[in-house]
Image (spheres, rainbow, N blue to C red):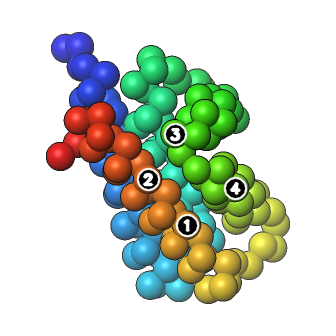
Amino acid sequence: MERSVTELSQYRYDCCLEALEDAKLMFSSGRYKNSLNRSYYSIFYGIRAVNVLDGFDSSKHSGVIAHFNQQYVKTGIFPREASKIIKLASEKREEADYLDFFVASKEDAEPMIEKAEKFQKWIEQYLTDKKIID
C-alpha cells in the first residue's frame, strides 16, 4: 500500500521524538555514548521529516544534511544555529560510535540533549505550520 508524503513526514517526526526520549533514557542510565547517538538521530529524523516534503531523500547522511542546510537554513526558514547544532551532533555521534576508547561524559551528553530538544521544537513548529502534525 502506497503511503503519502504527509504520513511519511509524520512517521519520521515520530522517530525524532522517540530518539529524543531514548537519548534522555540513556542519559538517566549513565549511558552517555548512547545518549549522544540518540540525540543525533533525533535531529537526523527531524531533518528527514522536513526533507521528505520536498520529495528529497538520500542514502547518505551528508546528503540529507546538505539538502536541509541548502533549502532550509540558507534560505532562513530555520535559523543558522540549526546548522551548527547538526554539525556538533554529528561530530559527537561519530566520536561516540567510532573512536576507540572514547568515553562520553555527562558534560558531553547533557548539552546535546538540550540542543536536540531545541531542534525538535523547530521541526515541530515547521510541521505544525505546514499542517503535517497537530
Query: Which residue is depicted at the point 35% across and 57% down?
Result: 18
Residue tagged 2 = 122
Q: Nearer the viewer, mark 3 or mark 1?
A: 3
Residue 77's mark? 3
Q: Earlier in the sequence, mark 3 or mark 1?
A: 3
Q: Camera-side residue: 123 or 4?
A: 123
Give, as a three-letter code, the residue at label 3.
Ile
* Quadrant location of the N terminus in the rendered image: top left
Residue tagged 4 = 84
Q: Nearer the viewer, mark 2 or mark 1?
A: 2
Q: Secondary structure at mark 1?
A: helix
Query: Which residue is depicted at the point 30% across and 34% down?
Result: 130
| Label 4: how many Cα within 10 Å (few below 14, some 14–19, many 20+) | few
Q: Are marks 3 and 4 in contact (CB under 8 Å)?
A: no
Give, as a three-letter code, the residue at label 2.
Trp
In the rendered image, residue 69, in percent from the top left (x then y), is placed at 64, 37
Q: How many labels, in total?
A: 4
Q: Camera-side residue: 93 or 6?
A: 6
Question: Distance from label 3 to label 1 (Cα)?
Answer: 18 Å
In the rendered image, residue 38, in percent from the top left (x then y), is placed at 51, 61
Query: Which residue is depicted at the point 71% across and 60% down?
Result: 88
Q: Earlier in the sequence, mark 2 or mark 4?
A: 4
Residue tagged 1 = 115
Q: Are marks 1 and 4 in contact (CB under 8 Å)?
A: no
Q: Secondary structure at mark 4?
A: helix
Give, as a three-letter code, the residue at label 4.
Lys
